[in-house]
Image: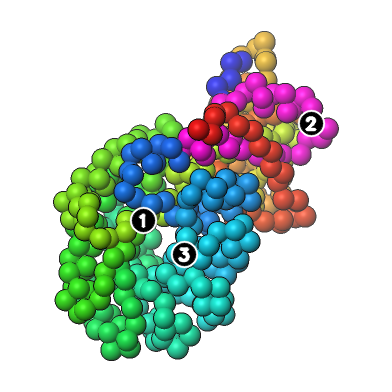
Amino acid sequence: MKTLIRNEAVIRQMLQEKENEQPFYVVDVGDVVMKWKEWKEAMPRVEPFYAVKCNPDIVVTHVLAALGVNFDCSTQKEIEIMLNAGVQPSRIIYANTCKGPYHLKYAKKTGVDLMTFDNEEELHKIKKIYPDARLVLRIKVDDSGSILKLSLKFGAEYDEIAHLLDVAKDLDLQVAGVSFHVGCNCQDPLAFHKAIERAKEVFNMGKDRGFAMNVLDIGGGFPGHRDHAISFIEFAHAINHALDCYFPPGCGVKILAEPGRYFITSAFTLLTSVIGKKEVPVRNNTNACTMYTINEGVYAAFNNLIYHNTKWIPTPLVDAADTKLKLTTIWGPTCDSVDQVAKNALLPDLNIGDWIAFENIGSYTMACGSNFNGFPTTEVKYLISAPFL
């Protein structure tokens, strides 16, 4: 059966050299570098601050740091990871609108002074712990065109903004700008245009109160799949047009974004092994259904099947003479019936020991996995498919 995964020849060589059936990720560092180049060419005015929570892989974060990418951190640990990688505090935004006091004290101690807020209580907390911080007001924008709507939890309503700016002024805090997020996996490039227009209104409100507004954070939501229905370039065009309208070159405003999925989704491929096979009858159907068990599941790489309803396409790495496809279900390895990776998947007949690949699996996968049932953390291997320059 012909397979269609990237870097197939190298991956097959890795499988031949592997001494056990344990699952592993293959990370194409070259893909990460190419994404950086595409970003710089498409949106040269927008500085990317990689969202560390998406995937804190040490090699990926070090490569991004070396390329000059900055970082969006939301906890003490994420800040610590990037500082230990040699990233200067000025290259970090503490993008969490509800920061634990202990974490906030760490940010002050290490000099990470740019941070977000969206409510009055957070302002009083910051005043008490880190009054010299530079604050970015996160506003709520229309994220109806996204798969994951972050406005359910984050962002100040429009009618709250004036009051929050007044409180910040009364507390003698520094409001430096505005941030927003159009939602994860955004499907509507024009959502950025509308959000940037709203941010301009808030900028003017801040300036009217005497704040030196010089930071615009346009958040994330950019596609990470190279075969996404809406290309990254389409998003870039919408953003560039809005910036030219409301924050033109020379306006003195630093534009930044918080891409996570964009940089690393397509760079990761997961290799899993078939460790179990069971034939079961299908009700009201004369065909049989094959249930395969693989050694990675929803408590590890596939957790977003539950949380975000993300779907991955299984690609068997077999050279089967019989290419007849069968109705199958793929299960993860744990002792939990919720651990289902794929349902009604059409696959060729597989045997225990065969390998199945899952592409586009870099974001919110290994970062969210657990060791439930005693399964170890999944191994990671690296390759470079494209030149760095």
Q: Residues within 10 Å of mark 1 (few under 14, many from 20)?
A: many
Q: Secondary structure at mark 2?
A: loop
Q: Which one is in front, 206 or 156?
A: 206
Q: Is residue 9 left or right of residue 44?
A: right
- Residue ID at (31%, 63%): 215
- Kindly identify which residue carries mark 2: 18
Labels 2 and 1: the sequence-earlier one? 2
Q: Please say if 8 is above or below 76.
A: above
- Kindly identify which residue carries mark 1: 256
- Kindly identify which residue carries mark 3: 90
Q: Is residue 227 left or right of residue 15?
A: left
The mark closer to the camera, 2 or 1, is 1
Alpha carbon separation for disc pair 2 and 1: 42 Å
Please tell me in which quadrant of the rendered image residue 329 appears: top right
Q: Is residue 388 left or right of residue 189?
A: right
Q: Position of residue 56 (x, y in %)?
A: 59, 54
Labels 2 and 3: the sequence-earlier one? 2
Q: Secondary structure at mark 1?
A: strand
Alpha carbon separation for disc pair 1 and 3: 13 Å
Q: Position of residue 107 (x, y in %)?
A: 52, 74
- The magenta region covers 6-35
Q: Secondary structure at mark 3?
A: helix
Alpha carbon separation for disc pair 2 and 3: 42 Å
